[in-house]
Image (cartoon, grey):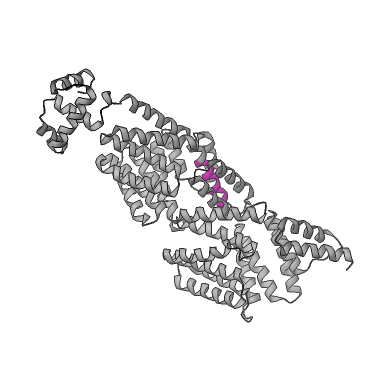
Amino acid sequence: MSAPVIDRAGRARDAVAREAWGEAYALLHARDRHPDEALTPDDLGALSDAAWWSGHLDESVAARLRAHAAHVAAGDHRGAGLAAWWLHYEYAGLGRPAVAAGWLHRARHHLDGLPPCPEQSFLAWADAEEATARGDGPAALAATGRMTRLAERSGSPDLLALSRQAASAALLAQGRRAEGLALLDEAMCAAEAGELSGVFTGWLYCLALTQCMEAADFGRAVEWTRTAMEWCAAFGTGDNPFRGVCRAHRVEVLDLLGEWTAAEEEARRACREVPVDCLEAAAAAYCAAGDVQRRQGRLDEAARSYAHAHELGRLPQPGLALLRLAQGRADAAAAGLRLALACQDARHGPLARARLLAASTEVSLAVGAVRDAADAAAELDALAGDVPLLRALAGTAAGAVALAEDPGAAAPMLRRALDLWLRLRVPYEAAQTRMLLAAADRAAGDEEAARLELAFARDGFEGLGAGPDARRAAALLSAAARRRLPGGLTAREAQVLRLVAGGATNKGVAGALVISEHTVARHLNNIFAKLGVSTRSAATAYAYAHGLV
């Protein structure tokens, strides 16, 4: 090889070693097109990685196919097995399960029977995922145990972190939440500490986000998403590891955080990036975009987004039902949710069902079906367990039902739910809960607290750009201002004054309001002072003159 050729090869391999993928792609792509520079099997594998990171997914697969053929020609079963496994993984991500299964079978053909080697850890991972899919928890954990032993034997931090992530997924699938999340945290610490290669760091961030959202652990999802984006900025990839389903989950996180402009842009990117053979992620992205558009009052755009999702094979619920409710078509909303709840299975995860149940509670109350709303809220409560995000959804739903059945019991439930939403930093749902809480406060006679909640809700909606909700809160706030009591009286003082004006003694007022006579006397002293009167008859005259009776 001439010196210039050697120099170009060295520069390309140096870029790969530095994980400067854009530079590596350009150099390797140029070398591959040069008639005098044949790429080695390892170079072709690097070209595949660089093409993937640079967004050239078709080229990534093509280069991996050539790398596999080159390893086979060289008699390198380990290299061929690893390339075959990567092809299985990439074709699965492209939504081509039959082709992916074929490449996994070929990877086993290359690697089975060899002495223990690092490449076999990927086969163990595939075994774990297959066992989890068929509900065989012990087999899944046995496979992740093999994966961990192979990773430890190899001394690879990348494989060890990946094996912990795989074991975490197996534990979570069995409902062993605390163990699974603890193991996931351990795996992600290695990524955050910079102990892993860039490829595995990005990969683990994406896998962690998916796991956290499927487990409805919103706090971890937010934390690992933000850490991943900081890593991307420092790593200089020019992009982020969230593509396909991973990007759809990132959209969910941004949506819940109230970062709606970013969420909608990420949804658009997901739809542009997803190949025609992988439609689930595009459908999820269209649903997320529709949710943002609906809450901003862009109902026609939301309808189109939900229609795109439906076209791709996904029931766009609960977003479509809430759109129909906003359009005044509550019966259509209820019918859509009944179908979605009947069609949903465990694969969709607890958060998806919780959202359907929360929407079902809201729609049922809107059509006056309080019993149906109570049933949906009860199922949601049983599903929520001690998961904060689900607990907040359940508390809001239960409070809404109580507001219809027993307003006096609603306020404590709604305050607990609001506290959870605020701690989770989920602004839209917090503002919605404040609206319900304002109604509960008003039912309890506390107009001042109701006005405060409405004001906070209005400000929250305005900050998000949720125009219809902001206008509704502002209208209720204006109505509350018109109901403001004269003379600076509190709601309780007005209750006392009405009873006194009706001829009740202090004892009678105390019995009616279930308070002590001493408290009644204190309220009367405050009333006399505020109204500038000194007798019960003068206070009674004031009450009639100002429409309090």
Q: Is residue 87 visible?
A: yes
Q: In what quadrant of the picture does the C terminus appear?
A: top left
- Magenta stretch, main secondary structure, is helix
Q: Residue furthest right?
A: 2
In the image, residue 312 sits, relative to residue 23, either above or below, namely above
Q: Which of the 4 image quarters holds residue 336?
A: top left
Q: Residue furthest top?
A: 545
Q: Where residue 290 sits: x, y (%)?
A: 52, 41
Q: Is residue 245 visible?
A: no
Q: Where residue 309 sits: x, y (%)?
A: 54, 45
Residue segment shown in magenta:
280-291
In the image, residue 58 sits, relative to residue 286, either above or below, namely below
**Depth check, front residue: 370 or 190:** 190
Q: Where residue 537 sits: x, y (%)?
A: 13, 21
Q: Where residue 34 sits: x, y (%)?
A: 85, 60
131 sits left or right of 396 in the view: right
Q: In what quadrant of the picture does the N terminus appear?
A: bottom right
Q: Which of the 4 image quarters holds residue 190?
A: bottom right
User: At x 51% / y 40%, what residue is drawn?
Assistant: 292
528 sits left or right of 266 in the view: left
- Does residue 305 belong to the magenta stretch? no
Number of marks drawn: 0
User: At x 37% / y 39%, what residue is drawn?
Assistant: 434
In the image, residue 156 sits, relative to residue 405, either above or below, namely below
